[in-house]
Image (cartoon, rainbow, N blue to C red):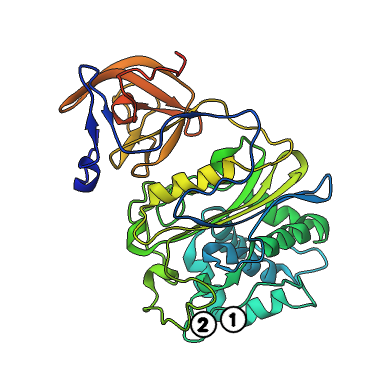
Amino acid sequence: MKRRLLATVASLLLVCGAAGTAVADAPSVRPEAATAAAVQVPPGVTAGVAVFDREAGTFTEELNTSTQFRSASIVKLLMALDYLWNRGPDYVVPPGDRAWLEPMLRSSKDSPADDYWSDHGGSAIITRMAGVNRLNLKDTAPPPAGYEGFWGYTAISARDTVSIYRYLLDKAPAPVRDFVMGNLRQSTRCASDSFDQHFGIAGAFQKPWAVKQGWSGGSSFEDGTCTPEGGTPTVASRTAASAPAVTPAAAADVNLTRPALHSTGTVGPNDRNIVAVYTLHAAGTSYGKAYTDIGRVTRSLNVPGAARPAGWWYGTWSDHVNVRRNPNTADDPMTQLPAGVEVLVGCQKKGQQVSVPPYTNDWWAYLPQYGGWITNIYISSPGNKMPDVKDC
């Protein structure tokens, strides 16, 4: 198993006695509750949240709904709608355009967004889409002066995100709705720039869901773990990671520097709930920590009729932990976990004995959201076998 212990992680490990499993200074286990409580925001996290129940026609959660966040890749929804706005009457998307629109929506590929932004007016795209003649958004604004080329610096809020999805679901021509939402339902686990993008909504709820995710963390988010199908991980070109230093004036209204992780979309049969979760994290927060924290926020939400996966939430330690199809190391890894991420464990069973000195363990944890297994060595638990998790 590929293993690269970070010195900073290793320093946090507490070695148990004869059990032989490492326990990190990580989130403790918490069984998934049958119903969610009020919004729970972990320390150090700034959140803007909105949940709109389309069946009841009311918000079930509202927290800092008008607060502006930098959009990161959520703005790609507005680019796609801008492209589709005047495609009528049949809104046919030619194969050549599907070739860039679909990966932009499904795997959040950045190069199509770069091209569309530069070829169609840049900030004017946001002005058009937010205007009264289109979506009439209240808090959405183009990137600040000096950063016009960076579409990820577009300002957006949770309530505006609900308005975007309400337009898509209730007002947009059927071909537009079907194209955009159909692609969001096919969100890939591995984004085009190598990150595991099934956090937030995709991690907290069982399907049906449709998601558009966003992230912007610069060097602190370098611990992405997925490799996209048929390709090599690429580096986002016009996100905050490659932007010039942010001046105090530019950061006054919308924070452009703290690591950001956002999850938006719909949850439940017939897209019953629109969910928007925007989060900012302390400087230097790792991708795995931010991934875990937005998961905790999202799991706490009141989302009527949503199906929540059964299992126990446990912290993990080390980076590039391999997820296997079976409880052994015979097959190539399916994917790898973000460093230190909290995972849902469905059950556990004995499998191949694995040694990662000084630890040895033959118990494996099944991760239903990944459809695969990891050795219990990397689970933050006091023993080789997790005490409260059922056997498979």
Residue type for callout 2: Glu
Residue 341 in the image, given as x and y percentages of width and height: 39, 41
For the point 43% across and 81% down, the residue is: 248
Instruction: State which tag comes first along the sequence, 2 or 1.
Output: 1
Give the crowd class for mark 2: few <14, some 14-19, many >=20 residues within 10 Å. some
Give the crowd class for mark 1: few <14, some 14-19, many >=20 residues within 10 Å. many
Q: Which mark is residue 161?
A: none
Total numbered circles? 2
How far apart marks 2 and 1 lie (CA) works out to: 6 Å
In the picture, measured across the screen, residue 287 lies left or right of residue 272, that is left
The picture quadrant where one finds residue 166 is bottom right
Q: Quadrant of the N terminus?
A: top left
For the point 33% across and 51% down, the residue is: 223
Q: Which mark is residue 148?
A: 2
Residue 346 in the image, given as x and y percentages of width and height: 49, 23
Using the rendered image of the protein, determine whether residue 199 is visible from the camera's viewpoint. no
For the point 61% across and 68% down, the residue is: 156
Q: Which mark is residue 123?
A: 1
Is 166 placed above or below 292 here? below
Q: Is mark 1 on a helix, strand or loop?
A: helix
Residue 186 in the image, given as x and y percentages of width and height: 60, 46
Q: Nearer the viewer, residue 274 or 369?
A: 274
For the point 68% across and 71% down, the residue is: 82
The picture quadrant where one finds residue 12 is top left
Q: Which of 201 and 125 is in front in this view?
A: 201
Q: What element carries label 2?
A: loop
Is 27 placed above or below 368 here? below
Q: Do the residues labelled 2 and 1 touch (CB within 8 Å)?
A: yes
Residue 202 in the image, given as x and y percentages of width and height: 56, 43
Q: Which of 75 and 220 is in front in this view?
A: 220
